[in-house]
Image (cartoon, rainbow, N blue to C red):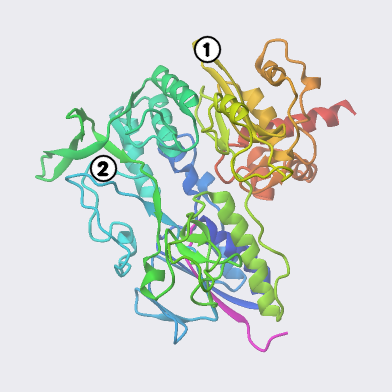
Amino acid sequence: MPDSPLRVVVIGYGPVGARLVDELLPAASDGLVEVTVVGAEQDPAYNRVLIAELAVGRAEREMLDLTDPDEARAAGVTVLTGVTAVSIERTRRRVVLSDGSALAYDRVVLATGARANIPTLAGITRLRRDHRRPSEEAHRLDDAGAPLPRGVTVLRDLADATTVARAVERGQRILVLGAGVLGMEIALAAAEAGAQVGVVYHGEVPMARQLDRGAGLLLARGARAAAVSMISHSPAESVLFRTDADGVERFDALVCADGKQIFADLLVLSCGVGARSELARLCGLDVAAGILVDESLTSWTDERIHAIGDCAQIAPPPRPGDSQAPPVGAPAGLIGPGWRQADWLARTLVAVAEGHSNPEPLGADPRPVVMLKASGIDVVAVGDVSRDVFDDLNADVHGPSIGHAAGCPVDPPLRVSSWMDAEHGRYVKMITRAGVLEGMVCVGMPRTAAELTLLFERRSELPTDRSVLLRHDGPDIDSSAAGDAFAPDSTVCWCNAVTVAGIVAAAEAGHTTVVCVGKATRAGTGCGGCRERIGQVLEHHSARIASI
């Protein structure tokens, strides 16, 4: 047992920072580690992924809570909220806070997350924050002296949710700039709640990072049917303002490159996020798209500093003679990988506190399954689906690529199978290698999507006749021919890696509702896309018990 506890300072009390603290509680209670967590917001950690659902009334505020700070304090953790870290003095090994105090450390964990990207628009100030000292006013950590104009918001915190909720309740005109997953979810949810909604995006299709052209066009058509105006091929250039009664300018219209003016009461910017890395950069750490850490989540620059979550970019450090170009890649940008990093780093820090290293490797994150949470529109995608069905024909004609000598092993080619029923809004594309799914997208075919997700997870070979899979959404579905969606090892919650067996174990322990299962296993507390599936597992388990 070490003579003194390992002093760990966690900067950031969001979902990932809170997960790390929760995993360290037993070690903190035992005196192995001394944990201090610094959070800029007054509220304890909450799930930002569900902010859109809160804004449109689909979720209660309590549903977003992820941690209990009183439990952490009872274990000996020092929880500081409403304060920011303004510098890290690496030589003196201390973190300086906005209130003038300083925290000594043995290890620092940066879990500062990400902030919403502000696009380049005439009329909205866009600052480069890389080398700016973090604001000493916690509530101004993101605006950095350039607050958004009245009538313009992002959707990253509780205050943003309140702004959007007010517009939804009044049935106002809401314009969403950006058609990614979050932009589409808030647009569809706000329209369902009674707001007048439009989505502006510069490309041909929404969710272009996850969907191909066919899936994207069907999603856009489905959104229009749900009363959302989809305005494609419209790069935004500037904003126009009107003056409120108190003399303050308010957003009035968005001006696009082709000259059209789109009027609305509220502009919601949904243009991606960027890592909060200015604190790391100011103290001399290597930073690219995020804070650069190796596979042990340790800074390239300082072995006493770690980074996890949306601010961390995992990449191997350069070796002598390597290219000096910035490393490729970016932070994961998803809550699931951030939580896995927090769990792993907690075990590592406990091992260090005990005087030995963590022998367990972090491992690569599985490719995430993207599910659009929207009533009446089923969209599921995973992997790269950009390959076109006609690419197969070209590959067959040209044979092996140049550079593969005779007798050398050649990877099996990618194959594409696709089917569309445009009239009814159904589409599926499967990208396979040697019969195993490498990527897929499904629109309007929820049971087929569920079967393909199961096959993707298990790396199982697809039927030779791919059309068999289409029957899962047909009227004559034979459930016995489908994969066992209730098999114990089937993943239910991808964010927390909770299987059917985990849900069943929780149910047998008395946790018989989706909310209770979430508290017991954390399933459904991430993106929320698996809640319906959790309910199905509980119903299946209950029916099985009743039949015995």
Type of the residue with mark 1: His
Give the mark nearer the N terminus: 1 vs 2: 2
Q: Which residues are magenta?
A: 1-14
Where, by quadrant of the figure, is residue 439 drawn?
Answer: top right
Q: Position of residue 46 (x, y in %)?
A: 49, 52
- Image quadrant containing the N terminus: bottom right
Are there few (<14), some (14-19), or many (20+) residues within 10 Å of tag 2? many
Is residue 496 left or right of 149 when viewed as pictured? right
Q: Residue 11: within the magenta?
A: yes
Q: Nearer the viewer, residue 535 or 239?
A: 239
Badge 1 vs badge 2, beta-carbon distance below 8 Å:
no
Q: Could you tell me which residue is drawn at 31 percent across and 39 percent down?
A: 268
* Residue that lies at the very extreme toward the right in this rendered image: 548
The single residue placed furthest to the bottom in the displayed view is: 3
Q: Which of these two is toward me, 149 or 466?
A: 466
Tag 1 residue: 424
Secondary structure under tag 2 reads strand
Q: Which mark is residue 152?
A: 2
Query: Does the magenta-highlighted stretch encompass residue 262?
Result: no
Q: Disc 1 on helix, strand or loop? A: helix
Q: Quadrant of the C terminus?
A: top right
- Marks 1 and 2, how far apart in space? 36 Å
Q: Which x, y percent locates residue 299?
A: 51, 71
Q: Residue at x 48, y 58 (%)?
A: 14
What residue type is disc 2 on?
A: Val
Q: What x and y, as percent, mark residue 453?
A: 66, 33
Taking 475 as reference, is 310 above or below it? Answer: below
